[in-house]
Image (cartoon, grey):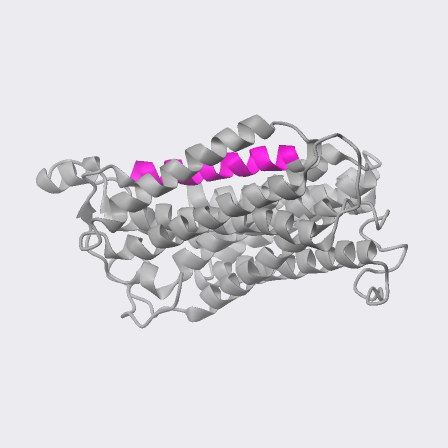
Amino acid sequence: MDASNDSPRSSGSPGTPTPYRAGPFWVALLAAAVTWPLLFVGGLVTTYRVGMAVPDWPTTFGINMFVYNFWTASWGVYIEHAHRLLGSFAGIGCIILAFWFTGAAGRRTWRAAGVAVVAAVALAFGLITLAGTESFLAVIIALGVAGSLLSLWYAVIERKGLPALGWLALTAVIIQGALGGYRVRLNSTDLAAVHGCTGQAFFALMVALCVVTGRRWQSPTPKTADALGLRGWTLGVAVLVYTQIVAGALLRHRSLGLEVHSTLAVVVLLAVVAVSWMVIRRRAVYPALVPSARAMIALVVVQVTLGIASWWVLRPFDGIPRPVTRGQAVVRTAHQANGALLLAASTILALRASRQLRSPRAAASSLNPTAPAPRDLEAAIR
């Protein structure tokens, strides 16, 4: 996940090399860097149970949230409002990414974007005038539908991966913001849990964008035979980590599944250590995978430690509500936020494994020139 000094390579079709563009990488990195504090502050909101400290949305006590003075507000209002502002900054980053990726892919890509914008305006107008939908909700629905269809168009029809990812990120941040907003409007704990889970997935998506826009991803890398099946194992670990995050959200928001969460923690620990050890012991064969594998081991150890500490500070489990101390808040929120970093590390490892390792089918194709070559992930993302 960097812009290291490797030689540039083609980002288009073979025979049409284009220079590496650092701009999208830095915008993606900035958006990801904003998203992690967003998750941490959102975790504080949950830990302190102040999700309804500001009872309206998208305004703050009836005032435009960008001009509301929250510096002298109470602690609950302060962190809830800061969470909203950080979410807005992440959204701005996704808007820049979507249009930047679209522009970098060539003039033809703007046609579909223009049609999507017109369709979104028409859909919003129809929802407001014909269905009587609230204006703000109609705009959110129209943007979400248009962004989703545009992402599918770029991915399936035009086979342009980066514009597809850019519009997917923009659609995801719109949905994420709407989930957070309607959690407040409906005062729904269930929506709060969903909002927490999708926030972690959105962070993983932003980290993935950092990887695929980095110079190292676009640098020539020889394919290595995937003799150990690491492509599947690393993907499985990433899915397992996210499953544990979902279980943690249910525990934090609904006080459900302590046994399930604890059991999954042991499974995640064993899986991370096993897969990381498979990579590290063969560091000479998989050098590009070693940093992510080491990061996963370090983060899973921290995660388990923070999980035990979180359990300890919540004692006694007698069901009597108690004020949350600063130490408890830091430990519990750090546990949730470190889980996002563990998910990011597992996502990077899965992407790099797919980038560097050659599937058995691809290996068979290389031995049989008449066999159709499988579509490469790197080529699909261009």
Q: Position of residue 145 (x, y in %)?
A: 63, 41
| Chief SS of the magenta region | helix
Q: Based on the displayed image, in which of its 4 quarters is residue 122 positioned?
A: top right
User: What is the number of callouts on the image?
Assistant: 0
Q: Is 34 on the left-hand or right-hand side of 127?
A: left
Q: Position of residue 56 (x, y in %)?
A: 85, 48
Of residue 119 and residue 27, the one placed in the foreground of this image is: 27
Of residue 325 and residue 70, the one placed in the foreground of this image is: 325
Q: Is residue 212 above or below residue 312?
A: below
Q: Position of residue 123 (x, y in %)?
A: 71, 42
Q: Which residues are magenta?
A: 231-251
Q: Residue at x 26, y 50 (%)?
A: 280
Q: The N terminus is located in which quarter?
A: bottom left
Magenta-span inclusion, residue 243: yes
Q: Is residue 167 above or below residue 70?
A: above
Q: Is 351 on the left-hand or right-hand side of 306?
A: left
Magenta-span inclusion, residue 70: no
Q: Residue at x 54, y 59 (%)?
A: 32
Of residue 154 and residue 144, the one placed in the foreground of this image is: 144
Q: Position of residue 202 (x, y in %)?
A: 56, 48
Q: Is residue 110 visible?
A: yes
Q: Residue at x 61, y 39 (%)?
A: 311
Q: Which residue in the rendered view is the most extreme toward the bottom?
A: 5
Q: Based on the displayed image, in which of its 4 quarters is residue 210 positioned?
A: bottom left
Q: Residue at x 50, y 58 (%)?
A: 102
Q: Is 283 on the left-hand or right-hand side of 161?
A: left
Q: Based on the displayed image, in which of its 4 quarters is residue 105 positioned?
A: bottom left
Q: Is residue 116 visible?
A: no
